[in-house]
Amino acid sequence: MTDAIENRQFRLVRRPKGMPQRHDFELATETLGEARDGEVRVAIEYISLDPAMRGWMNAGKSYIKPVGLGEVMRAGAAGKVIDSKHPDFAAGDPVSGNFGVQTHAVVPGDELRKVDTALADLPVYLGALGMPGMTAYFGTLEVGALAEGDVVLVSAASGAVGALVGQIAKKKGASRVVGLAGGPEKCAYVVDQLGFDAVIDYKAEEINDAVRRECPDGIDVYFDNVGGEILDAALANLRLHARVVICGAISQYNVTGNVGDTAYAPQNYLSLLINRARMEGFIVFDFADRYPQAAREMADWLAAGDLKHREDIVEGFDTFPETLLKLFTGGNFGKLVLAVED
């Protein structure tokens, strides 16, 4: 008989209008049940905070069903096994999975991933070796069809996905990689630490002019994480047969639909026609059967010191609603992670 465990959870209780607020969530406590055959109990140590979480709160049709009202907020997370009734896991094993915003979880062992903390600390498995890493890898190489000699433009270049996109592009033979980031500190990081060839401070420059300056012969691959006017500037500067990869549109996620708050529609979409280019959205889950391939290559780069990553770790489970907002205000620097500390 195992000891009862108090589990704290953030449950979605209202569909946000605009920016999520604390009152959209309920902080609840329950007694965690024991693991049954094939299940594992996990103590969660780190929770991944990702822009996609905002879309999961909406009721409309999407690539995945919305989080139900009263349900634990969906999130990836990492922690350690408390006890196991699955043959592949034992107490103390470090694991990652879709555990949700809670301090503990009971999950089927088949939905867990055992990770190697000798290679990287747990938070890295929520970033460079987790979903953002897979997103950058397949978005760049498969959807973007990167070819040697390509000119690549990346928005949100200091973020969890964008930082990896630029590095992958350089490793795979891009001739020039240009990032967009906000503020001097993030811009310096993109060039000095991540190795981009140039960076544009979207907070300080006219975007279209800056893109034309840094990509004077046009763009072969644009990896979009933000949407809005930055997407429009990229569209205006495409090369023949360019590929525009739609990964996210964080600038549009909290548009309320009120007067004056309508979403930004691209104006330069005819550039796709003129340049015989394509613009394609993708969801990383579509490549799930190939994650091991990407993870091996990314892990090799990490072990060799060739893949730079940065985690922005905020301590305190109770801060979840406010910490989540850092994603939408530009307040995070790197992969945003919540340290549970319970």
Image (tube, rainbow, N blue to C red):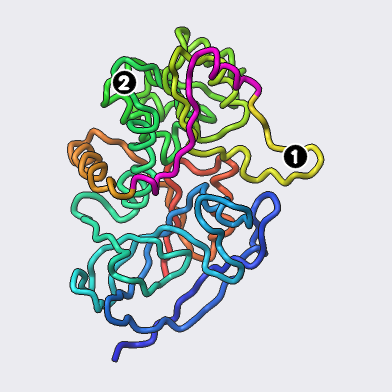
Give the side of residue 315 with respect to residue 113, left or right.
right
Circle 1: element type:
loop
Binning the other alpha carbons within 10 Å of mark 1 as few (below 14), some (14 to 19) or many (20 upward) gives few
Q: Residue at x 40, y 72 (%)?
A: 104
- Tell me residue 313's x, y (percent): 42, 52
Mark 1 lies on residue: 261
Where, quadrant-wise, is the C terminus in this rendering? bottom left
Numbered label attached to residue 147: 2
For this rendering, which residue is in front, 16 or 80?
Answer: 16
Q: Which residues are magenta?
A: 267-287
- The correct choice, above or below, for 119 with respect to 305 in the image is below
Numbered label attached to residue 154: none
Give the side of residue 222 with respect to residue 119, left or right.
right
Is residue 229 in view? yes
Circle 2: element type:
loop
Image marks 1 and 2: residues in contact by CB distance under 8 Å:
no
Specify the amino acid type for callout 1. Asp
Give the side of residue 193 with respect to residue 237, left or right.
left
Binning the other alpha carbons within 10 Å of mark 2 as few (below 14), some (14 to 19) or many (20 upward) gives some
- Tell me residue 182's x, y (percent): 54, 30
For this rendering, which residue is in front, 176 or 237?
Answer: 237
Q: Earlier in the sequence, mark 1 or mark 2?
A: 2
- Tell me residue 296's x, y (percent): 20, 44
